[in-house]
């Protein structure tokens, strides 16, 4: 509905995130007609001294290679202009502003709004200074209005204090509605589906509580280590890299109360509330580990105590969830790559089938790979005998939605930033509440107060984590 000129400025344009995620997502949006050539220009900004064409060549390698896309790819690349500059001096940002303004003028901006979207594909340590530069030199100046927005990505600090410091530095420069904190898990199809699933199905409404649900697991596994990213990863570890953000966002959507409406502030209000209801994590409900060989990575210090695996139990002190363990588990270099939510229901009271094959109802939402939802049910084993068996009601997306291409998380999220929809972005108080949950634990882990269990690459992770899960009440049931 908004018309006018849109400038997308990717800062850190020659870095990994920009090449692998940001530009390909922009290309997809372009291909789908969301970014019209006559209304959009893309600027890359970085320190490396290269030409427009050199940047385009670097990006090209990450875009679709097949012939059918060739024309779109070259048109898209023509939208990109490169500006060289440093992150802490004014000259570069003045040049950037000039380049944006020139294009706005060439597009006759006086007839529309000027919209400037700054995507910081940069290390967080430079966010505050870069935001300062943008604020000083690159704001939208159109008399007719428009906006300037900032997109940033985790890690937002290392603990509560550092996150709050960053929030207030950026908060002094930009208002909350201008700041888009990306958590790309919020852009995943089955994460976005959670709201519909929970609140548009009568079936789940009366069941989604402590009376019926025994335990919940939110699990992230990767079957590769930190190859090439050891330097970054070692400063953060798995809890800061995955659990405090990606898994916690999923946790919010599984556990929060029904929002007043679909307005993004209403949804985020509920997320904050459930985060604030989490009680301190107990030491005996935490297992941390590091895979064998992690320290062989030359970018990782030989004496690193950084966990690459963690399992812990979150408990919520409210009417709905009192007593229900939420097990959050994440690990690198495990036996498979998978992210899923498992909601396990309680046993049937007064079960008349006792002694036969037993099983609990379990609702599984697989975020990746191969998006799916399935419900484990007890059925009669087909045949003459009256015996029970466990089976599944299965909704696999590849089968049900054949031919539907599920958009990439970044693609959706960038589109939301252009539309001004903050539903799938992390609000400042939400970030604070998230850090409040993990900071005491992280500090004790950093001080070496937890035993770091070594596990083999390609394994399930430490057995202690399976034991913790069992203590949480999880009953292993077998897939049909
Ligand atoms: C990133 C983490 O945020 O998410 C990485 O920094 C991790 O360590 C990645 O590999 C996982 O994302 P996805 O979408 O592949 O599950």
Image: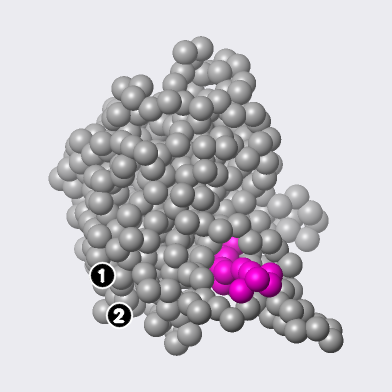
Disc number for residue 319:
1
On the image, the x and y values in percent for residue 323 come to 33, 61
Q: Against 89, is 21 above or below?
A: below
The image position of residue 123, as x and y in percent, is 40, 33
Is the shortest distance between ligand 1 and the CB of mark 2 under 8 Å?
no
Q: Compared with residue 278, is residue 462 higher up or lower down, i.e. above or below?
A: above
Q: Is residue 40 magenta?
A: no
- Which residues are the magenta region? 354-366
Residue 292 visible, this angle: yes
For marks 1 and 2, give the CA distance. Answer: 21 Å
Q: What residue is disc 2 on?
A: 261
Query: Which numbered circle lies on residue 109?
Result: none
Q: Residue at horizontal 60%, vertical 57%? A: 476
| Quadrant of the image containing the C terminus | bottom right
Residue 204 horizontal/vertical position (percent): 45, 80
Q: Closer to us: mark 1 or mark 2? A: 1
Is 183 on the left or on the right of 69, as rendered? left
- Give the residue displayed 44% in from the left and 53% down from the top: 472
Question: How many labels were placed on the picture?
Answer: 2
Seen as rendered, the residue at the extreme left is 172
Secondary structure, magenta segment, majority class: loop
Is 358 inside the magenta-drawn segment?
A: yes
Seen in the image, is 335 located left or right of residue 169?
right
Would you call the spot at circle 1 few (<14 residues within 10 Å), some (14-19), or many (20 or more)? few
Going from N to C along the chain, the mark reached first, 1 or 2, is 2
In the picture provided, is 298 more to the left or to the right than 418?
right
Residue 235, percent from left and from top: 41, 26
Residue nearer the viewer, 413 or 191 = 191
Circle 2 SS class: loop
Does 307 appear above or below 17? above
Determine the residue positioned at 29% across, 49% down. 434
């Amino acid at each position: 509905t908004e018309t006018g000129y849109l400038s997308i400025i990717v800062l850190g344009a020659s870095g990994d995130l920009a090449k692998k995620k940001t530009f390909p997502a922009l290309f997809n949006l372009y291909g789908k007609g969301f970014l019209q050539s006559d209304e959009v220009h893309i600027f890359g900004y970085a320190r490396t001294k290269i030409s427009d064409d050199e940047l385009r060549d670097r990006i090209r390698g990450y875009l679709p290679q097949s012939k059918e896309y060739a024309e779109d790819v070259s048109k898209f690349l023509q939208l990109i202009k490169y500006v060289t500059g440093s992150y802490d001096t004014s000259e570069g940002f003045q040049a950037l502003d000039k380049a944006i303004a020139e294009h706005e003028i060439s597009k006759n901006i006086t007839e529309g709004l000027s919209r400037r979207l700054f995507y910081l594909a940069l290390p967080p340590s430079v966010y505050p200074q870069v935001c300062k530069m943008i604020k000083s030199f690159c704001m939208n100046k159109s008399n007719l209005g428009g906006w300037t927005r900032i997109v940033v990505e985790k890690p937002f600090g290392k603990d509560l204090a550092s996150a709050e410091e960053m929030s207030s530095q950026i908060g002094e420069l930009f208002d909350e509605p201008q700041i888009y904190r990306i958590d790309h898990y919020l852009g995943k199809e089955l994460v976005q589906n959670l709201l519909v699933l929970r609140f548009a199905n009568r079936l789940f409404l009366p069941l989604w509580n402590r009376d019926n649900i025994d335990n919940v697991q939110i699990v992230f596994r990767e079957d590769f280590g930190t190859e090439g990213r050891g330097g970054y990863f070692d400063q953060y570890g798995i809890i800061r890299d995955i659990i405090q953000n990606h898994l916690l966002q999923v946790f919010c959507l599984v556990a929060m109360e029904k929002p007043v409406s679909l307005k993004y502030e209403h949804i985020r209000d509920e997320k904050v509330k459930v985060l604030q209801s989490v009680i301190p994590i107990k030491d005996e409900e935490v297992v941390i580990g590091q895979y064998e060989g992690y320290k062989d990575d030359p970018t990782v210090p030989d004496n690193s105590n950084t966990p690459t695996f963690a399992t812990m139990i979150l408990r919520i002190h409210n009417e709905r969830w009192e007593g229900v363990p939420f097990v959050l588990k994440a690990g690198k270099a495990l036996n498979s790559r998978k992210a899923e939510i498992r909601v396990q229901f309680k046993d049937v009271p007064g079960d008349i089938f006792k002694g036969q094959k037993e099983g609990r109802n379990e609702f599984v939402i697989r975020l990746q790979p191969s998006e799916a939802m399935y419900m484990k049910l007890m059925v009669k084993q087909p045949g003459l005998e009256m015996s029970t068996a466990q089976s599944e009601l299965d909704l696999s997306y590849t089968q049900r939605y054949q031919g539907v291409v599920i958009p990439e998380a970044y693609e959706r999220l960038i589109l939301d930033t252009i539309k001004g929809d903050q539903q799938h972005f992390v609000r400042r108080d939400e970030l604070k509440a998230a850090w409040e949950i993990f900071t005491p634990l992280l500090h004790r882990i950093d001080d070496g107060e937890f035993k770091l269990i070594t596990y083999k690459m390609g394994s399930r992770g430490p057995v202690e984590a399976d034991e913790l899960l069992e203590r949480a009440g999880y009953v292993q049931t077998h897939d049909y």
